[in-house]
Image: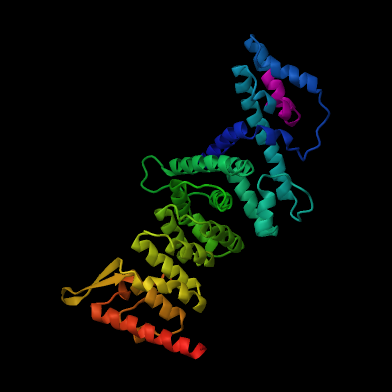
Amino acid sequence: MVERRASILLLGVVLSLAATALAARPSNDAQPPVDQRHIAQLVRQMGDVSYAVRERATRELARIGVPAKAALVKALADPDAEVRYRARMVLSEVLELDWRRRLEAFVDDTQGQKQHDLPGWQRYRKMMGENVSARRLFADMQRNEPGLLEASELGPERLAAAFDGRCQQIQESMRVPGRTTERAVQLGTVAALLFVGGDSDVPISPQSAMAVTNFCYQQPFRQAIAGGDKNPILKKLLGAWVRRSFTNDPSSMQQTMMLALQFNLREGIEPALAMLKEPGSPPHMRQYAVLVVGKFGGADDVARLEPLLSDQSVCGHQQLAANQVVETQVRDVALAVMVHLSGQKLADFGFKRAQPNATILFNTATLGFASTAERDAALAKWQQWRTRQAAKKS
């Protein structure tokens, strides 16, 4: 309920951004003819010197509802501050009622035989189709995030502002006074955030990117994406989010790589390769990008990783018996992944401690070498193998 109220508040903010679009959007419901001159008169009366007149005009416009929408949108720019305030208040109520009618009609139309002017539907339908499961999830998104989906049709810059504001609202609503556990974010909310944020044209702040990643690890989303009729749709939404590049922010990029590994998203390969080309990226990030390529890539990706064989950056350590410390470098992870992608055994290249990991492919701390001699021998063996492969092709 808290999230729902916050989303309605966001819808109020969207009104001030979307005046022209809202005025142009028709209603699906047939409306009786209304005297627009009478509506215009009521709008003017909202600024009357008499409080009783202002109140009566406001109540009448609310009763008229959708037919007064265009006049109310126009009144948002009225020179009179009182008229602007009351117009925004009435318009929020009118749009809420109009949205509820549209959504009810959408839900009732299980066969998709009618046109429904719900914000975001056309883009969503192209991405996800319109089977029963896709329509149900979209209805959940509408119920939870009407304001955010309305903002999705205002252009990237305006949507970005609404997106950041909504993420902040959600995070604040998660905190429950007197409790150590946070309130769970609803599936429809997470799906809506992934849907609008998956558009690479929309600038997403690092704070919002981190927030969305955290929402994906919460129980409602994890349960839904693990199985059930919404699984393929949620994987597409999350895949679009992962596919967009966050190379301008290292923390967001690392979280993206972890999402790809955690939820088995092949869409993570291209951003991983793009990140590996970024100069100065931290070693711990590069190791995860390499693992993404190793988990979802193939033999054709081996050549893309070979430049990393000269990367001596340290990305981890492992403590062995007798106080022996094994150091893992980025080139060690790259070599292990290339051996894996080329269909060979890691043990044959000196990776005697390598431990597979179902989520991230390998435990990277187990891919290090105890000495420089061991590492040099492994790299030399790889070069010998590459030379033999090249000779076979010539």
> Residue 63 at what x, y percent from top left?
72, 26
Q: Residue furthest top?
A: 49
> Residue 300 at what x, y percent from top left?
51, 77
In this view of the protein, which residue sits in the foreground, 356 or 107?
Answer: 356
Colouring chosen for the image of the structure: rainbow
Q: Residue furthest front?
A: 394
Asked if 260 appears above or below 73 in the picture, the reply is: below
User: Which residues are the magenta region?
Assistant: 57-72
Asked if 183 appears above or below 368 in the picture, the reply is: above
Q: Residue furthest right?
A: 33
Does the magenta-highlighted stretch encompass residue 324? no
Quarter-of-image position of residue 156: top right
Describe residue 251's horizontal placement relative to residue 265 as left or right: left
In this view of the protein, which residue sits in the foreground, 210 or 63?
Answer: 210
Is residue 1 visible in this depiction of the protein?
Answer: no
In this view of the protein, which residue sits in the foreground, 22 or 297?
Answer: 297
Residue ID at (61%, 50%): 140
Residue ID at (75%, 38%): 27
Quarter-of-image position of residue 340: bottom left
> Residue 347 at what x, y percent from top left?
35, 85
In this view of the protein, which residue sits in the foreground, 348 or 110?
Answer: 348
Residue ID at (81%, 36%): 30
| Secondary structure that dominates the magenta span | helix
Does the magenta-highlighted stretch encompass residue 66? yes
Describe residue 206's horizontal placement relative to residue 99 as left or right: left
Is residue 160 visible in this depiction of the protein?
Answer: yes
Asked if 315 appears above or below 213 in the picture, the reply is: below
Describe residue 119's horizontal placement relative to residue 197 as left or right: right
> Residue 316 at what x, y percent from top left?
29, 67
Residue ID at (42%, 69%): 290
